[in-house]
Image (cartoon, rainbow, N blue to C red):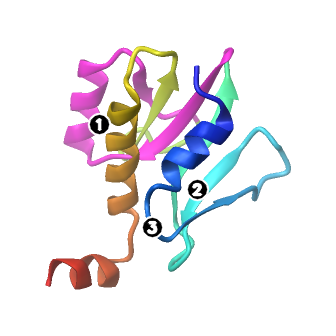
Amino acid sequence: MPSRAEVIALCQRLPDSYEDYPFDDPNWTVMRHKSNHKAYAFIFERQGHLWVNVKAEPQWGDFWKSTYSAVVPAYHMNKRHWVSIILDGSMSEEQVFQLIAESYTLSQSRRSTRAKTQ
């Protein structure tokens, strides 16, 4: 199982990222965009594993949940637009990163997303 620091480092591979601890609970780390402060990953420990909540397009969330047993409906989040990844070792680092990167893209401001595609 990766450590919290390793998951944070994985998230910080994405530009414009920073970690935040906005809750009165040190168990929750929130990864955000510096430019718009929107969250794209929530890292927490639950049931003996680290979990990461990430945003997903509904059809992709359904695909990830049907493909990986470690991807489940999001804990404490909108279950239509978010999924939880249980870091139990059943997914590779690159598979986890792919879902985090998708969440990062979905939570970017529309302006910065448009600027990158032009």
Picture quadrant where residue 5 is located: top right
Q: Which residue is mark 1?
A: 61
Residue 42, position in %: x, y?
58, 46
Q: Residue furthest right?
A: 24
**Residue 110 position within the rendered picture, expressed as x and y whole percent measured from the top left:** 31, 78
Q: Please state if 63 lies on the left or on the right of 30 as rendered.
A: left
Q: Amino acid at mark 2?
A: Met
Whether the residues at callouts 3 and 2 have beta carbons within 8 Å, the answer is no
What mark, if any, has residue 104 been given in the picture?
none
Q: Please tell me in which quadrant of the rendered image residue 93 appears.
A: top left
Span shown in magenta: 47-75
Please say whether residue 68 is one of the residues in the magenta stretch.
Answer: yes
Q: Label 1: state its secondary structure.
A: helix
The residue where tag 3 is placed is: 15
The CA distance from mark 3 to mark 2 is: 12 Å
**Residue type at the position of mark 3:** Pro
Residue beneath the point at 47% across and 32% down: 84
Q: Spatial distance from mark 2 to mark 1, Cα to Cα? A: 19 Å
The reply to whether dot 2 and dot 1 touch (C-beta < 8 Å) is no
Name the amino acid type tagged 1: Gly
Q: Residue at x 42, y 19 (%)?
A: 70
Q: Is residue 85 above or below residue 20?
A: above
Looking at the image, is mark 1 or mark 3 earlier in the sequence? 3
* Quarter placement of the N terminus: top right
